[in-house]
Image: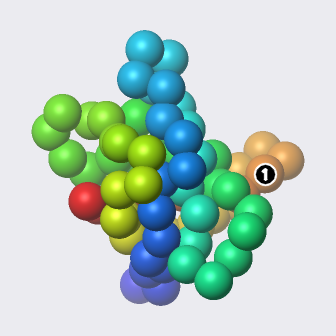
């Protein structure tokens, strides 16, 4: 089982389906895709509190299993 992080949504582009989340206590944003949002609709709002897992993707860290 992967450890979950908690943080907030820094930016999310609804039309393009991607954005960034930031874990609490950190500054570096982590990339997130709409497909990894476990909510209906699969969109996020800036400043929203979320929990997620983090995995290394192609050249960057990515948030997965994002829950509101």
Q: Is residue 43 left or right of residue 5?
A: left
* Model colouring: rainbow
Percent coordinates x, y for residue 11 in the rendering = 54, 41
Residue 61, located in which quarter of the rendered image? bottom right
Q: Is residue 43 visible?
A: yes
Percent coordinates x, y for residue 33 in the rendering = 49, 37
Percent coordinates x, y for residue 36 in the rendering = 40, 46
Q: For mark 1, what is the residue? A: 60
Q: Is residue 51 left or right of residue 63?
A: left
Task: Name which residue lies at 75% across and 63% down.
Answer: 28
Q: Is residue 65 visible?
A: no
Q: Is residue 16 above or below residue 63?
A: above
Q: Is residue 8 left or right of residue 30?
A: left
Quadrant (top left/top right/bottom left/bottom right) for the N terminus: bottom left
Task: Name which residue lies at 26% across and 59% down.
Answer: 68
Task: Name which residue lies at 44% across and 76% down.
Answer: 6
Task: Name which residue lies at 35% across and 42% down.
Answer: 44
Residue farthest along the front direction in this orientation? 47
Element type where label 1 sits in the image:
loop
């Amino acid at each position: 089982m992967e450890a979950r992080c908690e943080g907030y949504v820094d930016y999310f582009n609804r039309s393009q389906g991607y954005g960034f989340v930031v874990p609490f206590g950190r500054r570096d944003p982590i990339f997130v895709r709409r497909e990894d949002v476990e909510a209906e609709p699969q969109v996020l709002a800036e400043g929203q509190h979320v929990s997620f897992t983090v995995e290394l993707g192609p050249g960057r860290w990515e948030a997965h299993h994002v829950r509101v």
